[in-house]
Amino acid sequence: RWQTFSKHDQLLHIGAAIIRASNWQKENNEKYFKFCLNEALSLTNLCIQDLKWQDEISHPQILSLYQELEKFKSGERKDNIKILYQAL
C-alpha cells in the first residue's frame, strides 16, 4: 500500500514520525523516542524500496535521510532530531 502514496504523502508520514520523536526527545523519554525513530526508519526504508524514489536525485536524498536517522538511533547524533524534519 505504501507505494500507492505520492512522494509528498510519504514524506508527510515520515515527517510526522520525526516530529513525534522530537516531542519525546524533548521529554527525555528514550523508549518512545526510539519507538518513533524506528517508525521513521521503517517508513524511510519503504521509500528506498519504492521505485518512484529510484531516480538520480531522489534516491541519494532518501538514503541520506535513512543514514541520519540511523545516527540518532545509534546515539552517534544527540542533537535535536527536529532538524531532520526541517530538512524535509
Image (cartoon, rainbow, N blue to C red):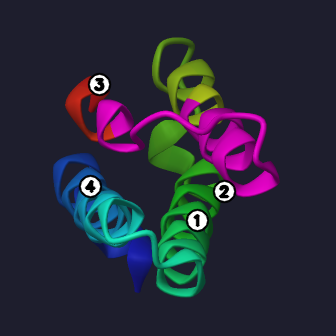
The residue at which mark 3 appears reads as 87
Disc 3 versus disc 2: distance between alpha carbons? 21 Å
Label 3 amino acid? Ala
Q: Position of residue 24 (x, y in %)?
A: 35, 72
Horizontal side, residue 32 vs residue 41: left or right: left
Label 1 amino acid? Leu
The residue at which mark 4 appears reads as 15
| Residue 49, numbered label | 2
Residue sitting at 27 percent across and 40 percent down?
A: 85
Residue sitting at 32 percent across and 58 percent down?
A: 22
Q: Residue furthest top?
A: 56
Disc 3 versus disc 1: distance between alpha carbons? 19 Å
Q: Is residue 39 magenta?
A: no
Label 4 amino acid? Gly
Q: Earlier in the sequence, mark 2 or mark 4?
A: 4
The residue at which mark 1 appears reads as 46
Disc 2 versus disc 4: distance between alpha carbons? 18 Å
